[in-house]
Structure formats: C-alpha cells, structure tokens
Image: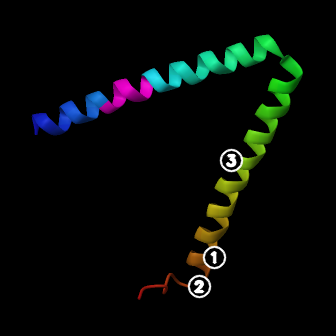
Amino acid sequence: MSSTESVLERMQRWSLAMGAAALALCAWGAYSNVQQFLRSYLLAYIFWSGVALGCLAVLMLYHLVGGGWEC
C-alpha cells in the first residue's frame, strides 16, 4: 500500500510542478502581449467547453436509449 501512496504523491508533485510552469508561461504571455493572450485564452476556453459539452451530449444520449450499447 505504501508503494501506491508514494506513486500518487510523486504524481501530485509532478502535476503541481507542471501547473506552476503552465501558470508562469501564461503570466509571461499575458505580460508580453495582452490582446493575443486573451484571444488565445478565449479560443482554448471555447474548445475545451465544446469537448465537455460533447461528452455530456453523448452521456445524455446513452441514458436516453437505456444504456444498451454493450458488445
């Protein structure tokens, strides 16, 4: 059990480091060119919202037909 916990702790530290690096990159982008940063942020937001809403539509369709899609 301790090996699983150590793997999770290592993954959490790695994720925190990557998130901090991405935040620093976003801050640099916002500092260098605010208008382009905001355009890029909006495009990314719309893209990922579309992915999430598409998954939601598939899930609602799955529940609508009774979930009988097993092979």
Q: Amino acid at mark 2?
A: Val
Q: Which residue is mark 3?
A: 48
Disc 2: which residue: 65
Mark 1: which secondary structure? helix
> x, y percentage for residue 34?
84, 17
Task: Determine contact: label 3, label 2, CB under 8 Å.
Answer: no
Q: Residue furthest right?
A: 35
Image-quadrant location for residue 65: bottom right
Question: Rounded to the nearest whole Å, what is the CA distance between mark 1 and mark 2?
Answer: 6 Å
Residue 68 lies, with reference to residue 61, above or below; the image says: below
- Name the residue tied to disc 1: 61
Location of residue 17 in the rendering, given as x and y in whole percent from the top left corner: 44, 21
Front one among 45 and 61? 45
When the figure is inspected, residue 3 is found, relative to residue 46, above or below; the finding is: above
- Which color scheme did the rendering employ for the protein? rainbow
Q: Nearer the viewer, mark 3 or mark 1?
A: 3
- Which quadrant holds the C terminus? bottom left
Element on which disc 3 rests: helix
Q: Secondary structure at mark 2?
A: loop
Q: Which mark is residue 69?
A: none
Q: Which residues are magenta?
A: 11-16
Residues packed near mark 1 inside 10 Å, few (<14), some (14 to 19) or many (20 plus): few
Majority secondary structure of the magenta segment?
helix
Amino acid type shown at disc 1 = Leu
Q: Residue visible at 60% across and 20% down?
A: 23
Q: Is residue 18 left or right of residue 10?
A: right
Across and down, in percent, residue 2 comes to 11, 34
For the point 81% across and 36% down, the residue is 42
Q: Is residue 12 magenta?
A: yes
Q: Mark 3 and mark 1: span between their CA atoms? A: 20 Å
Q: Position of residue 51 (x, y in %)?
A: 67, 55
The quarter in which the N terminus is drawn is top left
